[in-house]
Image (tube, coloured by chain):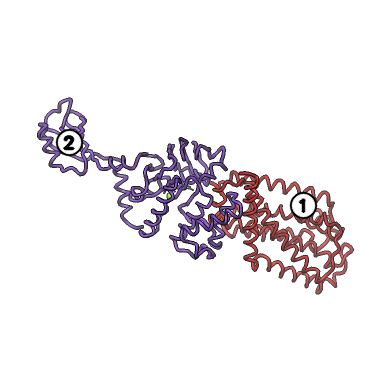
Chain colours: A purple, B red
C-alpha cells in the first residue's frame, strides 16, 4: 500500500549556512499515528514545513500518498492538513471567516465549505465564538481554531507541530482524545512533540530526531521495551574465556578482561550477581554503558516532567 | 485543482480582500475622499478661478483627471502592499502557501483586490468632482482601459514592495518618497508645455506623466504625450511586473525559506 508519507534523503541548509536536516529517511503508513519526537532545535518544524511547502528543501524527495511535493504539489497539498507550531491566522478576522476562507483556498464550493466550517467549528467547541475576532481567543482555543482550519478540507494526513505546547494538562487530555477519535476514523496523524509522555500515550510509531538526523524509527512498543533494558560493562579478575555465558542473560565479551550484559530494568541486581557467581566470574568493577538514545530520553523525560 | 476549484479559490481571495478594505473603510476609502475634496475646493474654487485656462480647459477640469488617477494609483498600491505585507507579518500568508492554489491564482486574487479598491476610490473621487465641475468623457474606452491597466500595474508594484518589506516602515517608503513625488511632477497640476525645454524633457522620463496624460486624454481629449505610446509603455511595465511577481512567488526566500 502507498505510504501516507515517504521521505528520502531529505536535507535542508538554511541561508545562513546552518544545516538543519542532514539526510532524513522516514515512512509513515496509512492510518498510522506517528510521533516525531526530539529536543528543541532537532529539526522537527523544518521537516514539517518542507512537507507542507512552507520551506524549500535543499535535497531529497518527499511523497505524500504517492504524490511528489515537487512534481505534483497541488495534488500532494490536498492530502495534507497542517496545524503549525506558531499561530498563523489573521488576528482581525472572525473564526468563521478564517475557516471558511481556508475551505475556499482548497476550492470547496460555497455550500460544502459552509457546512464543513460549521461542522469543524462545532467539533472543536468554537461555534459560540464564530463571530469573534481570532485575537479574542485564549491560547488553547487558538490552537483548536488551527485544528478546525486544518480539517476543513478533510485531509487524509493531519500534521500537528507541537500541538500541546503551552496548553494546560486538562486541555491536553481532551485534545488527545479528539486526535484519537480522528485517527480512528482513518486519518493518518503525524505529530511532533518533545514530551515523551505524549508520544507514548498517543502514537503507534515513533521517529526520534536529533540534530538533523533520525536516530530511531520504530514501533512504540519495541522502543519502550528497549528503554526497559540497560547495558552494563563488567570487569573481571583474571582472563575471560572466549565464550562468556551467564544463564538467562545475553552476554558479550568485550576484551579479555571485560564483558557486557543487557539487563532488564525491573530485575534486581542481586539476581544478576547470583548468576554471575554461578558462572564463576569474579567481578572487580561495573559501569553503565553510555547510550545516545538513553541520554536523549533522559533529557526528554526531564523536559516532559515540567509544564512549560 | 480543476478549473472550477481554481476559480473558487480566486474568488475567495478577492472576497477576502474586498471585505478587508470595506471593513476598515475609515482608513481606506474616507481619507482619499477627504483629500481629493480639499484639492477640488482649493484648485477648483479658491485658486483655480484665478489661474485661468490650461490646455483649453478650466483649471479644475484640467486637474480632475490627474487627481482621480492619483487616487487610483495610491489606493491600488496601498491595498496590495498593506494586505500582503500584513499577511506575511502575521504569518497567515501560510494559509495560502500550504493550499493547492497555483501562484497565478494567488497573484490575480491580490491584483483584483487592489484594482477593486483603486477603481472604487477612483469612482468616489470622480463623483465628488462632479460637485465642482462637469466632465465630458472624450473616449470612454481609452479612459477605462488606462485606469484598469494602471491599477493592475500599481497593484503588482505594491505586491513587490510587500514581498521585500521587513517592517511597516518599508510599506510606506515607496508611496511617500516615490509615488507621491512622481505623481505631483507627472503633470497632474500643470501641462509640461509650461516648463522649460530641459524640465519638459526630464518630465518625459517620468512614467506617471504618461499615465496621467493618457487618462486625461480619455476624459478631455488633450494630452502632452502620444497616447498610443503611453499605452505601449504601461503595457510593457505591467507585463514585466507580472513576470517578476510570479518569479517572486515561486522563488523568493522571503516567502519560503
Ligand atoms: N530560518 C532559519 N534560518 C536559520 N536557521 C534556522 C531557521 N529555522 C530554524 N533554524 C535552525 O534549524 C534548527 C532546527 O529548527 P526547527 O526545525 O525549528 O527545530 P524543532 O522544531 O525541532 O525545535 C534549529 O537549530 C534552528 O535554530
Ligand atoms: Mg519546532
Residue toward you, A161 or A96: A96
Label 2 beta carbon within 8 A of ligand 1: no
Q: Is residue A123 left or right of residue B208?
A: left
Check disc 2 and report its element: helix, strand or loop. strand
Res. B89 visible in picture: no
Res. B33 image quadrant? bottom right
**Any mark on residue A239, and which?**
none
For the point 80% across and 51% down, which residue is it?
Answer: B230
Which residue is depicted at the point 20% across and 29% down? A255
Q: Position of residue B137 (x, y in %)?
A: 85, 61
Q: Image quarter for residue B202?
A: bottom right
**Residue under numbered circle 1:** B205
In-front residue for pair B158/B144? B144
Are labels 2 and 1 assigned to the same chain? no
Residue B20 in sight here: yes
Q: Is residue A252 above or below residue A50?
A: above
What chain letter is assigned to the residue under label 2? A
Tell me if A93 is positioned left or right of A215 in this view. Answer: right
Q: Is residue B38 above or below residue A49?
A: below
Tell me the element at label 1: loop
**In the rendered image, which quarter contains the N terminus of chain B?**
top right
Crowding at dot 1, Cα within 10 Å, few <14 / some 14-19 / many 20+, comes out as few
* Front tag of 2 and 1: 2
Task: Tell me: B80 left or right of A145.
Answer: right
Query: In the image, residue A211 lies at what x, y percent?
Result: 39, 43
Badge 1 residue CB within 8 Å of ligand 1: no
Q: Report the residue marked by disc 2.
A: A234
Q: Are marks 2 and 1 in contact (CB under 8 Å)?
A: no
Position of residue B47 in the picture relative to residue A177 (left or right): right
Pinpoint the chain carrying mark 1.
B
Amino acid at each position: 500500500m502507498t505510504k501516507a508519507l515517504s521521505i528520502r534523503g531529505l536535507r535542508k541548509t538554511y541561508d545562513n549556512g546552518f544545516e538543519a536536516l542532514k539526510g532524513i529517511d522516514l515512512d509513515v503508513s496509512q492510518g498510522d499515528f506517528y510521533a516525531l519526537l526530539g529536543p528543541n532545535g532537532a529539526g522537527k518544524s523544518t521537516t514539517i514545513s518542507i512537507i507542507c511547502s512552507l520551506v524549500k528543501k535543499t535535497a531529497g524527495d518527499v511523497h505524500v500518498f504517492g504524490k511528489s511535493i515537487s512534481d505534483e504539489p497541488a495534488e500532494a497539498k490536498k492530502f495534507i492538513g497542517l496545524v503549525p507550531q506558531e499561530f498563523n491566522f489573521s488576528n482581525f478576522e472572525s473564526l468563521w471567516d478564517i475557516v471558511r476562507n481556508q475551505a475556499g483556498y482548497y476550492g470547496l464550493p460555497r455550500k460544502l465549505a459552509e457546512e464543513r466550517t460549521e461542522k469543524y467549528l462545532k467539533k472543536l467547541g468554537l461555534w459560540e465564538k464564530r463571530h469573534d475576532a481570532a485575537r479574542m481567543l485564549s491560547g488553547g482555543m487558538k490552537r483548536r481554531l488551527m485544528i478546525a482550519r486544518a480539517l476543513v478540507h478533510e485531509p487524509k494526513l493531519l500534521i500537528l507541530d507541537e500541538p500541546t505546547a503551552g496548553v494546560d494538562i486538562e486541555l491536553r487530555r481532551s485534545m488527545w482524545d479528539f486526535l484519537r477519535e480522528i485517527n480512528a476514523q482513518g486519518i493518518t496523524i503525524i505529530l511532533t512533540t518533545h514530551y515523551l509522555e505524549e508520544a507514548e500515550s498517543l502514537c503507534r510509531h515513533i521517529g526520534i530526531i536529533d540534530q538533523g538526523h533520525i536516530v530511531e524509527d520504530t514501533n512504540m512498543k519495541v522502543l519502550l521495551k528497549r528503554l526497559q533494558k540497560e547495558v552494563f560493562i563488567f570487569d573481571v579478575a583474571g582472563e575471560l574465556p572466549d565464550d562468556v555465558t551467564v544463564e538467562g542473560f545475553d552476554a558479550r565479551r568485550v576484551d579479555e578482561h571485560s564483558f557486557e550484559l543487557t539487563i532488564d530494568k525491573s530485575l534486581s541486581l542481586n539476581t544478576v550477581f547470583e548468576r554471575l557467581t554461578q558462572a564463576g566470574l569474579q567481578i572487580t568493577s561495573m559501569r553503565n554503558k553510555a547510550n545516545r538514545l538513553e541520554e536523549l530520553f533522559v533529557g526528554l523525560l526531564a523536559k516532559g516532567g515540567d509544564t512549560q | 485543482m480543476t478549473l472550477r476549484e481554481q476559480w473558487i479559490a480566486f474568488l475567495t481571495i478577492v472576497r477576502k480582500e474586498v471585505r478587508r478594505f470595506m471593513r476598515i473603510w475609515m482608513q481606506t476609502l474616507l481619507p482619499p475622499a477627504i483629500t481629493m475634496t480639499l484639492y477640488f475646493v482649493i484648485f477648483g474654487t479658491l485658486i483655480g478661478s484665478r489661474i485661468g485656462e490650461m490646455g483649453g480647459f478650466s483649471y479644475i477640469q484640467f486637474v480632475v483627471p490627474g487627481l482621480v488617477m492619483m487616487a487610483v494609483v495610491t489606493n491600488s498600491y496601498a491595498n496590495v502592499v498593506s494586505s500582503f505585507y500584513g499577511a506575511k507579518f502575521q504569518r497567515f500568508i501560510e494559509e495560502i502557501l500550504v493550499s493547492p492554489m497555483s501562484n497565478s491564482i494567488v497573484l490575480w486574487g491580490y491584483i483584483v483586490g487592489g484594482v477593486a479598491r483603486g477603481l472604487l476610490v477612483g469612482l468616489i473621487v470622480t463623483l465628488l468632482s462632479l460637485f465642482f465641475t462637469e466632465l465630458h468623457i472624450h473616449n470612454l474606452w481609452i479612459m477605462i482601459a488606462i485606469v484598469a491597466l494602471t491599477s493592475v500595474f500599481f497593484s503588482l508594484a505594491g505586491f513587490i514592495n510587500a514581498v521585500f518589506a521587513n517592517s511597516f516602515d518599508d510599506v510606506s517608503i515607496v508611496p511617500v518618497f516615490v509615488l507621491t513625488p512622481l505623481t505631483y511632477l507627472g503633470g497632474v497640476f500643470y501641462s509640461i508645455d509650461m516648463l522649460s525645454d530641459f524640465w519638459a524633457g526630464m518630465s518625459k522620463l517620468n512614467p506617471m506623466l504618461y499615465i496621467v496624460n493618457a487618462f486625461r486624454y480619455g476624459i478631455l481629449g488633450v494630452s502632452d504625450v502620444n497616447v498610443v505610446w503611453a499605452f505601449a509603455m504601461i503595457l510593457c511595465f505591467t507585463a514585466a511586473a507580472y513576470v517578476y511577481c510570479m518569479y517572486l512567488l515561486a522563488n523568493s526566500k522571503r516567502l519560503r525559506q
